[in-house]
């Protein structure tokens, strides 16, 4: 199985407090900066999505991919969207309006096709008869970190 | 299967009576792990295409309600999402 990884860029992270920013008054003028939030998820979200993935796979009798890097990228993408949007929007699709998609919910993980048909095009949750499935539905945080260095997990 | 993902059928509106024409099985019905939908008739509850003015990319945009009569006289309601090429209008 040939895997194609998204080499997604790590965008600018949120700035640290600027040395000349006033801390005395919350209304003090701040210099204008155009900053794009990083898609690198926080540890809490990453651990949360890792645990959710394991539990949901158990609940639905599904498995992770035999190549755990596939699982890792998806888990990371879910965590990134959770941080960015407040909900784990499916990271394997392109959207015109992510906020509207999150509010409507069809593609919030577990998405409607997964909930109703056990169809996960991300290859996160694989049914027993799927030829790419592994033997279990577990993945460690270390594995996620090691196999997703430099990969955002989000398809944009 | 033809048609684009999430494509709508011009003749099927909310409230329409439809019949499932393809082999679709759903797994979210309580006490019924494999619930086949083929040949079942239901009603379109909602077409998931727009949300507050923005277009949504749902690939199963027809949210339909199916009602079964059970042996004990109760009704079982099943809501499932379907694509345009999985249903047809019932006259």
Image (cartoon, rainbow, N blue to C red):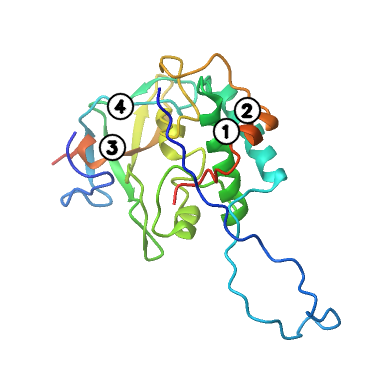
Residues at marks 1 and 2, CA–CA distance in whole angstroms: 15 Å
Q: Position of residue B73 (x, y in %)?
A: 41, 25
Please report whichever mark, 3 or 4, sits nearer to the chain's N-terminal start.
Answer: 4
> How many residues crowd around disc 2 within 10 Å: few (fewer than 14), some, or many (20 or more)?
some
Q: Which residue is mark 1?
A: A72
Residue position for label 4 = B24
| B21 horizontally vs B66: left or right | left
Mark 2 element type: helix
SS at mark 1 in the image: helix
In this rendering, the label closer to the viewer, 3 or 4: 4
User: Could you tell me which secondary element the residue under label 4 belongs to?
Assistant: loop
Given this view, does label 1 or label 4 mark the residue nearer the observer? 1
The chain identifier of the residue carrying mark 2 reads A
Q: At which x and y percent is residue A50? A: 64, 34
Q: CA distance from mark 3 to mark 1?
A: 39 Å
Helix or strand or loop: what does disc 3 sit on?
A: strand
Side (left or right) of B9 relative to A40:
left
Q: Residue at x 40, y 50 (%)?
A: A94
Q: Badge 3 is on which residue?
A: B42
């Amino acid at each position: 199985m040939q895997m194609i990884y998204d080499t997604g860029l790590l965008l600018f992270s949120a700035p640290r407090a600027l040395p000349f920013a006033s801390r005395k008054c919350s209304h003090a003028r701040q210099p204008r900066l155009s900053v794009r939030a990083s898609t690198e998820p926080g540890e809490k979200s990453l651990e949360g999505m890792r645990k959710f993935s394991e539990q949901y796979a158990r609940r639905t009798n599904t498995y992770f991919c035999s190549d755990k890097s596939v699982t890792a990228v998806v888990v990371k993408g879910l965590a990134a969207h959770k941080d960015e949007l407040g909900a784990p929007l499916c990271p394997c699709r392109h959207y015109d309006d992510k906020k509207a998609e999150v509010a409507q919910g069809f593609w919030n993980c577990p998405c409607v096709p997964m909930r109703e048909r056990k169809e996960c095009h991300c290859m996160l949750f694989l049914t027993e008869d799927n030829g790419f499935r592994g033997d279990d539905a577990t993945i460690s945080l270390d594995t996620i970190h090691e196999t997703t260095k430099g990969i955002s997990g989000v398809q944009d | 299967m033809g048609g684009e993902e999430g494509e709508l059928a011009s003749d099927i509106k909310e409230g329409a009576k439809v019949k499932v024409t393809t082999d679709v099985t759903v797994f979210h019905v309580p006490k019924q792990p494999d619930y086949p939908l083929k040949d079942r008739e239901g009603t379109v509850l909602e077409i998931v295409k727009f949300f507050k003015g923005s277009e949504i990319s749902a690939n199963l945009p027809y949210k339909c309600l199916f009602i079964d009569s059970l042996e004990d006289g109760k009704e079982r309601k099943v809501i499932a999402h379907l694509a345009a090429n999985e249903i047809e209008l019932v006259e």
